[in-house]
Image (tube, rainbow, N blue to C red):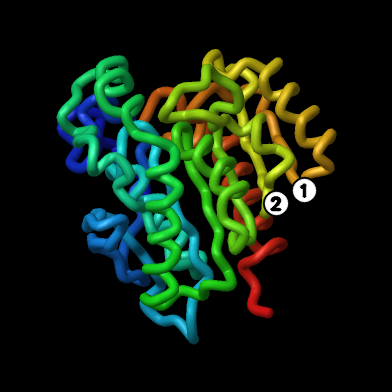
């Protein structure tokens, strides 16, 4: 179901991405259970959104959904609902919660400099481990752990595939592959190509000005050199955030193909029992 909302007061979307595009998708909740929860992590209670099918036969495969720079706003919640309809327990943790709230920022550059850049990778990866533990205690199958992420979360998905040996598969949507190293971000995906514990599918846009094609090729070479089980798909007509149906960057054809590839990747590498 697609909303025709074009105003900037669409509830639940980050202020820094208004106005919301008319292509925004809203997934109905008739067949799923979804809502907010709190996950104990590193001495704190981390807010999270979760969704699962209403009727499940035994523990569900788990997908951790990692936010864009905008936090767990309505788009990320809808991704969880879509995954629940596919039979997954999907969990999206608020990974900036210690440093601040993305909803306090009305423009992207300030959000990046004042909040996103202050979130340490090590903190994020440890929080994701606690999300996996929570899922295993709340109807998820610890042996079928998967991850996907978008933009900021795409980069984190690559890093998590090198961090958690229990992970079965990862899908990274337009996550940055190379960059300057900082105390908070000491490594990037290209630096962990030799350390991947799980197969990774990368989904990228050829027209993404923030992730130039030469950096994608550098990552491909690093993966080949490492003999890693990974694949990178580049969509010729897509730019950055091509799956973000609430933004002008949305490219429906590429998004639909990427979604199907993600589901197939999960099925191939970890969503099935046994």
Residue at position x 51%, y 75% in the image:
141
Observer-nearest of 136 and 1: 136
Residue at position x 67%, y 53% in the image:
197
What residue is disc 1 on?
Answer: 229
Q: Residue 68, located in which quarter of the rendered image? A: top left
Q: Residue 22, located in which quarter of the rendered image? A: top left
Residue at position x 80%, y 28% in the image:
221
What residue is disc 2 on?
Answer: 199
Q: Badges 2 and 1: C-beta atoms under 8 Å apart?
A: yes
177 relative to 29 in the view: left or right: right
Q: Decide which of tag 2 and tag 1 comes sooner along the chain.
A: 2
Does the image show residue 22?
A: no
Residue at position x 31%, y 58% in the image:
41
Observer-nearest of 239 and 166: 166
Badge 1 marks a residue whose secondary structure is loop
In the image, is residue 224 above or below residue 163?
above
139 relative to 33 in the view: left or right: right
Characterize the local packing of mark 2: few (<14), some (14-19) or many (20 or more) Cα atoms within 10 angstroms.
Answer: many
């Amino acid at each position: 179901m697609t909303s025709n909302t074009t105003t900037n007061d669409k509830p639940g979307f980050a202020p820094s991405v208004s106005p919301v595009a008319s292509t925004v998708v809203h997934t109905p909740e008739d067949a799923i259970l979804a809502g907010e929860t709190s996950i104990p992590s590193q001495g704190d209670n981390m807010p999270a959104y979760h969704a699962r099918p209403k009727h499940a036969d035994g523990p569900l495969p788990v997908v951790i959904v990692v936010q864009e720079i905008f936090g767990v706003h309505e788009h990320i919640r809808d991704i969880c609902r879509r995954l629940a309809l596919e039979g997954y327990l999907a969990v999206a943790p608020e990974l900036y919660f210690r440093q601040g709230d993305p909803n306090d920022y009305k423009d992207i550059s300030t959000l990046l400099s004042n909040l996103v850049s202050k979130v340490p990778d090590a903190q994020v990866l440890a929080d994701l481990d606690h999300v996996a533990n929570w899922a295993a205690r709340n109807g998820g199958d610890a042996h079928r752990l998967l991850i996907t992420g978008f933009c900021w979360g795409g980069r984190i998905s690559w890093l998590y595939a090198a961090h958690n040996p229990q992970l079965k598969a990862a899908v990274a949507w337009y996550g940055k592959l190379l960059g300057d190293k900082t105390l908070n971000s000491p490594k990037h995906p290209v630096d962990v190509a030799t350390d991947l514990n799980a197969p990774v599918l990368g989904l990228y846009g050829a027209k993404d000005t923030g992730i130039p094609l030469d950096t994608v090729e550098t990552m491909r070479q690093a993966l080949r050199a490492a003999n890693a089980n990974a694949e990178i798909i580049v969509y010729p007509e897509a730019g950055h955030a091509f799956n973000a149906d609430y933004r002008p960057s949305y490219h429906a054809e590429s998004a639909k193909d990427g979604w199907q590839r993600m589901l197939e990747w999960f099925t191939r590498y970890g969503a099935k029992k046994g």
